[in-house]
């Protein structure tokens, strides 16, 4: 029963994130991010998310933006060194979010600006592992071996699908104190909608019917929380400094269970109505922009996600070595009054550890490169088009044999090694309009 409980615990903590940002936070909420990445000093409508205090330096008027992004990701695990299988096994999962919309709006009058947005602020995709995962297979194989059932006596059929979306509705006020300084205060209401469906059957080869190890789970999870946000923008000469701090969001998700093979026993944590912590970490951003020429601008930026302070299931956040740090840079060039070209770079470093990483929820340090353009149809209408891809550094997790169940590779007491890798690409297009 303990093996069964551990299996489902891993199953229900699958993480799906197809956008840029921290463990639970998406930072690309406007197509302008895709083309330049470093938008923390923006004085444009995408600043509703990236630099809300900077909205106070817009011209008076009403602004509206509609954006559509598409994100596609693969996750691959090469598993080896486990004594109950020979060689290396490859497990591949795919995550996709073909249509992710977002809306930004602002109204500027005198020194005051009111702004709001609706976007997918975390998660943002569906993941499918059609051939299961090594943690599932190894655990079942070790359990059956302890019962005297050898691998030649059965076959394993397993699969898992998951979805995870965090929708954010933001509202706030910016105030221009003087020609140098502006400030912002606001908040975001976050609503989580996740779902996980999986099964595993070890079927006897003797008759192809007898099920030796049945597991089934189908559960949806929902919850909500509020994120207070403050910001400031400082303009001095050709420099512009944008600062923002998002406070930690206290958030629990509640199970709405459709199928559970043992709701009063090993699967009790996923019974209908059970709550699990799923806090969104605090975030500090700082972007410094500089205007080299009237038609040439560049920005450098830093993000820090306070991941270790945000509650996760079973206090998993304590296994991190540190929070997430991101370093960004971007440049844009007005090559013509109708066209602006831009490019950007982002480096993301998570405070990862072997104990934090698992087959269903793993992260890899990475760098991203983006490029794109702005097409200025008129002084009131412009189109942002951008594309970026991410190159991930493989993460290797090696576990030595202990001989004690509950420890070792996936709790089997045996040895094993997983190499985690990912790919990611995102395309975005958005239209901004000033009334």
Image: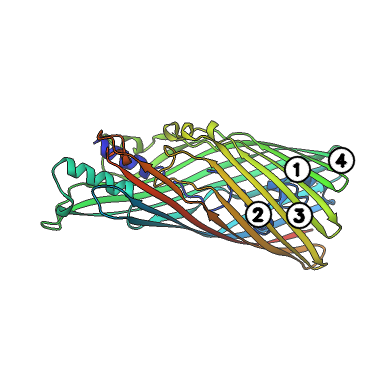
**In terms of secondary structure, where does tag 4 sit?**
loop
Q: Earlier in the sequence, mark 1 or mark 2?
A: 1
Name the residue that disc number 2 marks.
345
The mark found on residue 180 in the picture is 4
Name the residue that disc number 1 marks.
242
Distance of label 4 from label 1 (alpha carbons): 12 Å
Say few, some or many: other residues with alpha carbon within 10 Å of mark 2 (under 14 / 14 to 19 / 20 or more): many
Q: Nearer the viewer, mark 4 or mark 3?
A: 4
Q: Nearer the viewer, mark 1 or mark 2?
A: 2
**In terms of secondary structure, where does tag 2 sit?**
strand
Q: Earlier in the sequence, mark 4 or mark 1?
A: 4
Distance of label 1 from label 3 (alpha carbons): 20 Å
Q: Nearer the viewer, mark 2 or mark 4?
A: 2
Distance of label 3 from label 2 (alpha carbons): 28 Å
Q: Position of residue 158 (x, y in %)?
A: 29, 53
Q: Earlier in the sequence, mark 3 or mark 2?
A: 3
Name the residue that disc number 3 marks.
63
Distance of label 2 from label 4 (alpha carbons): 28 Å
Q: Earlier in the sequence, mark 4 or mark 3?
A: 3
Q: Earlier in the sequence, mark 2 or mark 4?
A: 4
Q: Is residue 98 visible?
A: yes
Distance of label 4 from label 3 (alpha carbons): 23 Å
> Residue at 52% across / 57% down in the picture?
424
Picture mark count: 4
**Residue 339 location, quadrant:** bottom right
Q: Position of residue 83 (x, y in %)?
A: 25, 47
> Residue at 53% across / 47% down in the picture?
365
């Amino acid at each position: 029963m303990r093996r069964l409980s551990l299996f489902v615990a891993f199953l229900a903590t699958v993480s799906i994130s197809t956008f840029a940002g921290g463990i639970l936070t998406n930072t690309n909420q406007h197509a302008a991010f895709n083309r330049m990445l470093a938008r923390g000093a923006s004085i444009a409508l995408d600043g509703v998310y990236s630099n809300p205090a900077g909205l106070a330096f817009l011209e008076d008027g009403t602004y509206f933006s509609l954006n559509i992004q598409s994100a596609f990701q693969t996750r691959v695990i090469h598993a080896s060194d486990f004594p109950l299988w020979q060689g290396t096994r490859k497990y591949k999962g795919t995550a996709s979010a073909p249509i992710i919309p977002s809306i930004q709006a602002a109204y500027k009058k005198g020194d005051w600006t009111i702004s709001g947005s609706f976007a997918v602020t975390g998660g943002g995709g569906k993941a499918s592992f059609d051939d299961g995962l090594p943690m599932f297979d190894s655990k079942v194989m070790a359990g059956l071996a302890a019962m005297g059932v050898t691998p030649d006596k059965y076959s394993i059929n397993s699969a898992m699908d998951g979805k995870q979306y965090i929708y954010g509705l933001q509202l706030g006020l910016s105030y221009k104190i003087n020609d140098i300084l502006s400030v912002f205060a606001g908040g975001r209401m976050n609503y989580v909608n996740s779902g996980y469906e999986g099964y595993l059957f070890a079927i006897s080869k003797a008759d192809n019917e007898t099920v030796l190890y049945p597991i089934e789970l189908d559960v949806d999870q929902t919850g909500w929380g509020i994120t207070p946000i403050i910001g400031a923008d400082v303009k001095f000469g050709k420099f512009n400094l944008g600062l923002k701090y998002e406070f930690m969001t206290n958030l629990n998700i509640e199970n709405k269970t459709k199928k559970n093979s043992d709701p009063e026993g090993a699967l009790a944590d996923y019974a209908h109505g059970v709550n699990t912590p799923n806090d969104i970490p605090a975030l500090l951003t700082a972007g410094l922009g500089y205007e080299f020429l009237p038609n040439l601008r560049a920005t450098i930026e830093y993000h820090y996600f306070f991941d270790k302070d945000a509650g996760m299931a079973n206090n998993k956040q304590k296994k991190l070595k540190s929070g997430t740090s991101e370093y960004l840079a971007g440049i844009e060039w007005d090559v013509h009054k109708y066209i602006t070209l831009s490019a950007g770079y982002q480096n993301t470093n998570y405070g990862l550890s072997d104990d934090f990483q698992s087959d269903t929820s793993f992260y890899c340090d990475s760098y991203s490169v983006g490029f794109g353009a702005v097409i200025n149809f008129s002084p009131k209408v412009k189109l942002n088009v951008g594309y970026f891809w991410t190159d991930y550094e493989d993460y290797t997790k090696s576990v030595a044999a202990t001989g004690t169940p509950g420890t070792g590779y996936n709790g089997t007491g045996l040895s094993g090694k997983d190499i985690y890798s990912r790919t990611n690409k995102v395309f975005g297009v958005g239209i901004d309009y000033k009334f």
